[in-house]
Image (cartoon, helix red, strand yellow):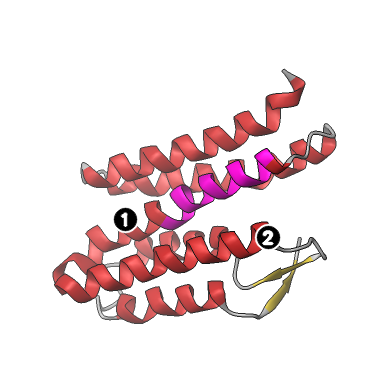
Amino acid sequence: MKSQAANFITISNMSFGGAAIMATLHEYYSYSVLFIFIAALLDRYDGKVARALGQVSDLGKQLDSMSDIISFGVAPALLMYKVVLVDFGFVGMTMTVLYIICGAMRLARFNVSEANGYFTGLPITAAGTILTLTYFASNTFHPAFYLFLFPILALLMISTITLKKV
């Protein structure tokens, strides 16, 4: 049981990401937002639990990345696509897919890099949380704002900026 505690938290994160996608598809956007935030909370603790229990593993690292692409890549992108970008047709789809691709590239780079106390590029968890937070202002921002926000977040994820881990 102890050996799988962190993986259980990670799978719970992934489950909430999947639930957020399902909620978005059924136009329950507020639930989708809630599920993404719960996933973020779980993501915050899976690594801490793994380290505290001495159960850090390559499997856990890969599982965490698979979870993150669902919970902070696909779920927020699909949510905000359905809320604001759907009316932009092909351009809206392109911005959404670009964000997801860059998130996957960011995670792949993280998985093959050595831990040094810094993140290279904006972590997908932060990008997904920022994107999800904008849901609350989606009636305030002009929809074209998202045509800039999506690629900015995408480029920040694959950039070489360094951020200290907290």
Judged from the image, the secondary structure of the residue bearing numbered disc 2 is helix
Give amino acid for label 1.
Leu
How far across and down, in percent of the image, does residue 105 sit?
Answer: 52, 65
Q: Is residue 157 magenta?
A: no
Measuring 56% from the left and 66% from the top, which residue is drawn there? Answer: 106
The residue segment tinted magenta is: 59-73
Q: Which residue is mark 2?
A: 112
Foreground of the two, 12 or 7? 7
Residue that lies at the very extreme toward the top in this rendered image: 1
Residue that lies at the very extreme toward the front in this rendered image: 112
Quarter of the image for the N terminus: give it: top right
Depicted 150 relative to depicted 69: above or below: below
In front of the other: label 2 or label 1? 2
How far across and down, in percent of the image, does residue 108 sit?
Answer: 58, 60
How far across and down, in percent of the image, does residue 162 sit?
Answer: 71, 77
Q: Is residue 70 left or right of residue 65?
A: left
Foreground of the two, 103 or 165? 103
